[in-house]
Each structure stands twice: as C-alpha cells, then as structure tokens.
Image (cartoon, helix red, strand yellow):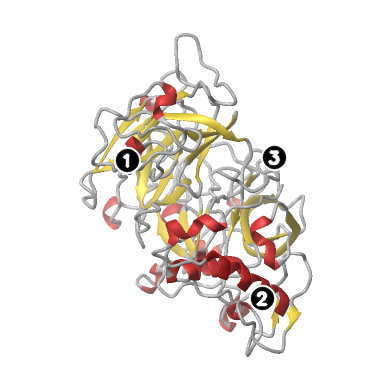
Amino acid sequence: MRRPPLAARVRRSLLPLLLCCCCLAAWSPPPAARALPLCTDGRAPLPLNRTLAFCSAYGGGSGNSSSCCDAAADAALRKRFDAMKVPDAACAGVVKSVLCANGRFFVSYNCDRTQSPKCAGRCSCNSAANCDPSKLGTDNGAQPCQYQVVVSEYSAKVSSSTVSMATSANPSEVRRIFTMGLPYTAHHGGQILFGPTDGYLYLMMGDGGSKGDPFNFSQNKKSLLGKIMRLDIDGTQSQSQTLNQSLWGNYSIPKDNPFADDSDLQPEIWALGFSNPWRCSFDSKRPSYFYCGDVGQDAYEEVDLITKGGNYGWRAYEGPYIYHPQQSPGGNTSLDSINAIFPVMGYDHSSVNKEIGSASITGGYVYRGSTDPCLYGRYLYTDLYSSMMWTGTETPEGSGNYTSAVIPLSCSKNSPIACESSTGSTDPLLGYIFSFGEDNSKDIFVLASKGVYRVVRPSLCGYTCAAEKPDTNNGTTTTPGSSSSAPATRLGKSVAVALALAVVLLRCPHGLFFGIVSFALSVQAALVTPLVL
C-alpha cells in the first residue's frame, strides 16, 4: 500500500545548545563550513581584514575574507563560551561550532513545476537512466516530473551571537541544494539526515511510485530513485561537474561513496534497492547502526540495517519474499545478479489490519532515553494505519540476530489531551502515525494526525517496570537501564501529549544539528518556539 504523498517534509532533531555536550562528548570537532551565502538576518557577510579571534574558521583571514560575525560579536561569543567552562575538548569543539555556525537549517519538500518557476529540476526519467518520459503517461492527472523533490538551505532570523534563541526563520532561500523531477505522484521519500560521524547529508528517495516500480528504478544504478544518497553540501563542485551538469544541485560527492568501488553506480548513491524509505535514524549510542523502515507493496513491511553499497532487494524482493511484478516495461533484475540484504525486522500485512489490509511502515528510533528504562536499547517502529507498535532487539549485540515483539500501547491518565479509545479497547486511536522524533534527552515522540505524543514513565499507564526509579523532574526522568537487564516480560510503552507542531532540522558546519526553529512551508510545518524539556 502506498503512503499518501505529503506536500512537504520537515526534518527535525532536538539538541538544545547547552545540553549537547553530554551526548556528543565523544565526537571529534566538525570541520568548518566552506560556504555561507547569506547571514541569518538576510544581510551580506561583512568584509574582514583579519581573522576572527574566536570563530577563526568561519570568517576573515586568507581565503575567507567575509563573515556574518564582526569583531564585537566574535568577542561576545568567546565570553559566552568561556562562561560554560566545558571540560572535555571534543565537546568544547562541538559547542564552539554551534556558537559560530550562524543558524543554518535545511528542509526537504515537494514542489509543483506548474505552480512555481523555481521548480525546474531535471527529470529523473531520462536517457542516462534508460527511461523515456513520454512512455510514462499521466498519474492522477499529473504529467511525468511535474512534481519535484527539493532540498534547500535556510537560515534562522537572528544575529550570529544569539542563534540559540532563534524563534523564526528567514523566508528567503539561502541556496537550493538538490532538485529532481519525479516520474509519478507517490513514493517520493524525501527524509534528510546528517551523519553523526561524517557530517554528510543523507537523502532518502523512494522509487517514484506506480505499483511495483514498473521501470525498475530501484535496481537501476544510473537512477537515483529507490536509493539512499550521501552528499557533501559544504564541498564545492569541480569545474568538470559544473560544466557538464552531472549533479542535481549545489553539492559535491564524498570521495568514499560506493561509486569508488562500483563504477556503474551514480556517485550520489550510498545504498540501493528501496521502495519508499519512510523514516530512518542513526542509533545515538552506536552511530554505525543506521536503520530505515521501507514501505512494502502487497505483502511485507520491513526495517533494514543500512550499510555502504548495500542492495536491499526491491523490486526483485519484497522483504524476504520474491516479488512478481505485474508489468515490467523497464525490465527485470534476476535474483542471482544481486546480493540482496534482507530485513532485520518487519511484519506481514495480514498481521496488521485484517479488515482493510492496509499497511505502511513508519520507522523509528533505538530508544536511548531514561524515562522508560525497560525500553532501553530497543528499536521502536509502527504502522501508518495501525495502533500497533513493535520493538526490535539485537541479541546479543553485534550478532545481527534480531527479535521483534508487539508491545502494549496506551495513554497516560495525566496526558494533557486525552486519547480516544474504541469501546472495549484500551488502545489509543492516534489517527495516522506519520513519524517518530527524538529530543536532546533521548525522549521519543510520536507524530500522529491527532497530535504529537511522548513516551512517559510506564507506571503512568499502569505498566510495571522493575527498573523504573522513583519519580523526579516532574515524574518523567529515571535512570537508564540496559536492554539486557530489562525484564523480558516488560515491553510496555506509553505515550502522552507533549507538543502539537513539528520542528525542522538545523545544522552547524559539517554535521552538528539542533532543532530550535521551524518555517511554515505547508500545512505539515508551523512556527514553534524553542523546546525546553
């Protein structure tokens, strides 16, 4: 079942400035940005005759003669930094990069080229991908590549010295990073993440739609559809790339992308063989663990553990099952021609909704919070159409062996907005569950059509967790346990309303990101103030 297309997708991660050093202390300081066309207040950068004393990597000096930060602002930032007295060198480097970063943030959304003159990317169905747009036909009244996926950079509307206090965004686009026309009206994917260790932008792209990926875009190594891409948005394009327009926007290619080992791959590709990656995340404790939920077609919804150059099988396979397409104008991929990587978790459609048979996975996070210690180390995921929720656990860690279980789901009686329940059932009717989120405290949020909910202490819903400590911090904070020490019989999860709006992704140079503002691009996003948890 295809997920209904969304007009815009706003990515979010919540890491308020003064709390980030606790979880990021092991990181090495991210490299400095190499480009920032506009300042956060929309003015042009200031010309500088000398290198800034504190934010030296972000303006002034040889080869970098302008900055959004003058000498007075630079001195004010140093004063704030010195007052923090950060003891760890790596953490101090991260905090400094946040202070000097000028409030960059990034959004991914769809545009309609018939409505916007800036919606003018190349069509993903082209001769290089062995595809002719004239053979696609219309889809729900739309022409091929009428709708396009866009990734853009914006800036917070504040001075460079008060980025952490931003509550609004400058509506002017700083730069367009990526634009590509999509063949059909569904399976556009579009999530963006920044790698926690490499700082590159990961862009998840669906197969473009139409039942069964008839043109086999997902297995076509010359197409970016049905792929996860990895882009360097701080690097500059080479002269040859600029002249031949080989890229899809303003970015460069990391030298260690898989194309270095497989010349048949488009250089942007990090992994292939996806139907519609819907919500991916890095494990905050083990950042090499990169999970993605991938939407199925007729039978199976899956969770994949993403690796460099991995092929996840679609459309030769749907999850663990061989897939038999109804039509194949783009040809087929033989099973023995690929080394397919099978899901680590998932579920059959029949186990979700026996009445209407609909299913569409919503990938989540490995729970690393302290609110419910019995969930610690378990990967949470759910279904768009279902009130069911699953946890997956790798046992033992590092083995690649996963087990999944459906967990109880109910709402706290203390929830600011009561959950509606059907007669005879305690399951909350949250509506469609679109996404998960994680804040700086590693608390998990659930974005549903009826609101945004937060995982709370299990005892608030009548669940028993032996590791739960006496309530502190207004009843929401406990000491984290571990997945191995959590009682095997306790898999309860509870949710409570915490927010009602989405927050976009802010990013410091080359990888650090924190959520403090959002910008209204469509009904999917609205302006919010900074989160205090």
Of badges 3 and 2, the one in the foreground is 2
Q: Which residue is mark 3?
A: 523
Q: Which residue is mark 1?
A: 345
Query: What residue appears at the point 38 percent right and 25 percent down from the top-left corner?
Result: 408
Q: Residues within 10 Å of mark 1 (few under 14, many from 20)?
A: many
Marks 3 and 2 sit apart, C-alpha to C-alpha, by 40 Å
Marks 2 and 1 sit apart, C-alpha to C-alpha, by 51 Å
Query: What residue appears at the point 60 percent right and 40 percent down from the top-left corner?
Result: 5
256 vs 322, left or right, is: right
Q: Which residue is mark 2?
A: 75
Q: Between residue 352 and residue 11, name the one nearer to us.
A: 11
Q: In terms of sequence position, does the residue under pointer 3 or pointer 2 come before the other?
A: 2
Residue 147 makes an appearance in the image: no
Q: In terms of sequence position, does the residue under pointer 2 or pointer 1 come before the other?
A: 2
Of badges 2 and 1, the one in the foreground is 2
Residue 465 location, quadrant: top left
Q: Between residue 273 and residue 432, name the one nearer to us.
A: 432
Query: What residue appears at the point 59 percent right and 24 percent down from the top-left corner?
Result: 417
Kind of residue at badge 2: Ala
The residue sitting at the top extreme is 424
